[in-house]
């Protein structure tokens, strides 16, 4: 039996991606504001992405998690990218979280992606989010990511900014 948004009864793989663009003088990241009805971190700022799910078809395939991430980004923003772009990259963030009350272990991976690697369509939000913004590093302190529970979001963004500075 598969549980929506979980790999098993007790295990989830949560993936987020910091989509970075250069705005002539500085780098900016795409943030999405979660809906007030979100089960975790309502109204907080977040990155596109989500939980991996078992494929509907019975396939054996490497790097299926990257297809999941690409699907989630498209669902949440209408931006598209080829999963192969991330194939040879390492995550910029890796951590785990254990919810003792629900007995769920979550593996969290954060990725970085150049906005130029997407189809650069107009951003169209899913019902999961209420707003989006392009935010520079200085403005991140004004954003509520959900305290300790959302600390991985801020870390993913900061590491993605560092990666882009190294590449330029």
Image (cartoon, helix red, strand yellow):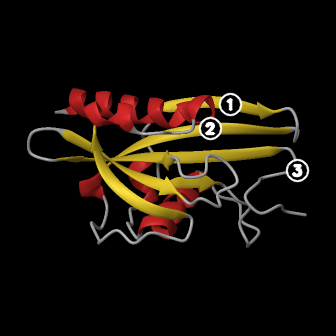
Neighbor class of circle 1 (other Cα within 10 Å; few <14, some 14-19, many 20+) is: few
In percent of the image, x 56 and y 60: which residue is there? 35
Q: Which residue is mark 3?
A: 9
Structural distance between the alpha carbons of marks 1 and 3: 16 Å
Neighbor class of circle 2 (other Cα within 10 Å; few <14, some 14-19, many 20+) is: many
Q: Nearer the viewer, residue 16 or 149?
A: 149
In percent of the image, x 37 and y 29: which residue is there? 158
Q: Is residue 91 visible?
A: no
Split into 4 quadrants, where in the image is the N terminus? bottom right
Tell which circle, 1 or 3, labels the residue nearer the N-terminal end: 3
Q: Nearer the viewer, residue 84 or 123?
A: 123
Q: Nearer the viewer, residue 51 or 59?
A: 51
In percent of the image, x 68 and y 37: which residue is there? 107
The secondary structure type at the circle numbered 2 is strand
Q: Which residue is mark 1?
A: 96
Given contact means CB atoms under 8 Å apart, are the residues at marks 1 and 2 in contact? yes
Q: Which residue is mark 2?
A: 108
Split into 4 quadrants, where in the image is the C terminus? top left
Structural distance between the alpha carbons of marks 3 and 2: 17 Å
């Amino acid at each position: 039996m598969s549980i929506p948004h979980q790999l098993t009864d007790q295990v989830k793989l949560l993936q987020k991606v910091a989509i970075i663009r250069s705005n002539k003088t500085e780098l900016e990241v795409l943030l999405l504001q979660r809906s007030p009805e979100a089960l975790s971190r309502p109204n907080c700022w977040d990155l596109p992405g989500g939980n991996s799910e078992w494929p509907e078809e019975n396939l054996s395939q490497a790097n299926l998690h990257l297809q999941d991430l690409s699907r989630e980004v498209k669902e949440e923003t209408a931006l598209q990218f080829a999963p192969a772009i991330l194939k040879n990259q390492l995550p910029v963030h890796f951590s785990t979280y254990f919810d003792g009350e629900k007995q769920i272990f979550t593996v969290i991976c954060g990725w970085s992606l150049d906005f130029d690697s997407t189809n650069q369509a107009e951003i169209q939000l899913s019902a999961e989010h209420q707003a989006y913004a392009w935010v520079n590093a200085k403005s991140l302190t004004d954003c509520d990511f959900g305290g300790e529970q959302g600390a991985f979001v801020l870390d993913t963004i900061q590491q993605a900014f560092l990666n882009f500075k190294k590449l330029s």
